[in-house]
Image (cartoon, rainbow, N blue to C red):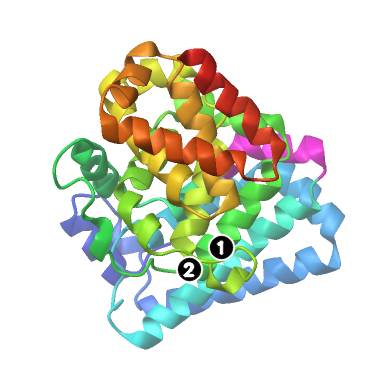
């Protein structure tokens, strides 16, 4: 459902709509969305098993939520510049994501696998990633002089929606199918967009750091970056070589090395090490890092830092670097 104001904005952007079927007032549409979502949330609270089974079987929530949430996350709203509209629509999006969260948490393992097939991970990644135009611009900037221009990026919009989306992804990451989903060539745009966003935030992540011992100090960007790296750390070297190319992998090597060497976040640092050691199994990439003095010194500092950490699991990835040499 769309309002006339929303339809006119979409028409101006080249998207065909049916204005005769549109709502007269956008505020009325937002209020109706909110009431419908409150009813659905109430149904989940009163009949969790029945509603969950029906929603998973029909696939209705993932299907309809994706188009609705993607529009309001990546496109202009009517009267978005008004604080009351921003607040009202933000509350509607939070309600919608809360329902998706209830659906995932009330589902068993088999139902969660079905939700992954229906596109729940795509829905959540849509909340975390920028729009398609920004994704293309970030990918095109990789390797260029201005590729790290994110040092002045504004705060991320709709942080509550992104936090809920991240919670859903973490829940689904308990299943191996979640990692296989991102290796499927049909979903190629998602891992590519994650890598582009990580590269775009590269310097900013090193500048804005929080403390894992005090979670409220961890910035939203750092949380999203750690989640991205955790999902991407299972990608094989063959997958990366085919879908990213050697040139882009060389740039990502430098980013992963910096995050491993300099960042205090344990998850982010460990996943960056996993990806860096995996990339270095290609001798061309290993030599490109170690052939210059600054790169070799950076690896030496990172290895020295790892040897002083209590977590022994990281040593096997350091050994992969030694074997690659």
The image quadrant of residue 244 is top left
Circle 1 SS class: helix
Residue where numbered disc 2 is placed: 159
Would you say residue 224 is visible in this rendering? yes
Image spot of residue 274 (x, y percent): 54, 31
Residue where numbered disc 1 is placed: 163
Query: In this view of the protein, which residue sits in the foreground, 271 or 29?
Result: 271
Which residue is depicted at the point 15% across and 47% down? 146
The answer to whether residue 88 is left or right of residue 296 is right
The image quadrant of residue 108 is top right
Image spot of residue 33 (x, y percent): 53, 71
Image spot of residue 103 (x, y percent): 72, 54
Query: In this view of the protein, which residue sits in the foreground, 227 or 306?
Result: 306
Which residue extends farthest left?
Answer: 145
**Relative vertical location of residue 295 with respect to residue 240 in this rendering, above or below:** below
Image spot of residue 303 (x, y percent): 51, 35
Would you say residue 123 is visible in this rendering? no
Chief secondary structure of the magenta portion: helix
**Magenta-tinted stretch:** 108-121
State which quarter of the image contains the N terminus: bottom left
Crowdedness near tag 2: few (<14), some (14–19) or many (≥20) residues, C-alpha within 10 Å: some
Which residue is depicted at the point 69% across and 71% down? 39
For marks 2 and 1, give the CA distance.
6 Å
The answer to whether residue 193 is left or right of residue 54 is left
**Relative vertical location of residue 68 with respect to residue 305 in this rendering, above or below:** below
Circle 2 SS class: helix
- Residue 116 on the magenta span: yes
Cβ atoms at labels 2 and 1 below 8 Å apart? yes
Crowdedness near tag 1: few (<14), some (14–19) or many (≥20) residues, C-alpha within 10 Å: some
Residue 147: which disc? Answer: none
């Amino acid at each position: 459902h769309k309002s006339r104001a929303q339809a006119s904005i979409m028409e101006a952007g080249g998207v065909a709509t049916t204005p005769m079927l549109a709502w007269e007032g956008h505020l009325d549409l937002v209020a109706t969305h909110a009431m419908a979502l409150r009813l659905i949330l109430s149904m989940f609270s009163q009949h969790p098993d029945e509603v969950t089974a029906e929603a998973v079987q029909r696939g209705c929530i993932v299907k309809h939520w994706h188009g609705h949430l993607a529009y309001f996350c990546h496109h202009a709203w009517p009267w978005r510049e008004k604080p009351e509209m921003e607040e009202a629509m933000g509350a509607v999006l939070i309600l919608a994501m809360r329902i998706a969260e209830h659906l995932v948490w009330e589902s068993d393992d088999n139902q969660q696998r079905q939700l992954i097939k229906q596109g729940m991970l795509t829905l959540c990644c849509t909340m975390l990633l920028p729009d398609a135009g920004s994704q293309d611009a970030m990918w095109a900037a990789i390797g260029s002089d201005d590729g790290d221009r994110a040092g002045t990026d504004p705060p991320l919009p709709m942080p509550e929606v992104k936090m809920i989306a991240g919670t859903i992804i973490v829940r689904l990451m308990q299943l191996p199918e979640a990692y296989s989903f991102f290796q499927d060539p049909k979903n190629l745009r998602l891992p590519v967009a994650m890598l582009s966003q990580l590269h775009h935030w590269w310097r900013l992540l090193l500048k804005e750091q929080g403390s894992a011992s005090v979670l409220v100090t961890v910035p939203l960007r750092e949380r999203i970056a750690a989640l991205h790296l955790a999902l991407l750390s299972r990608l094989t070297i063959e997958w990366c070589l085919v879908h990213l190319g050697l040139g882009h992998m060389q740039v990502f090597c430098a980013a992963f090395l910096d995050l491993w060497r300099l960042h205090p976040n344990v998850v982010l640092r460990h996943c960056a090490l996993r990806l860096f050691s995996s990339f270095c199994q290609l001798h061309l990439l290993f030599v490109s890092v170690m052939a210059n003095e600054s790169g070799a010194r950076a690896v030496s500092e990172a290895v020295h830092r790892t040897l002083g950490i209590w977590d022994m699991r990281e040593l096997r990835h350091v050994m992969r670097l030694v074997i690659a040499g």
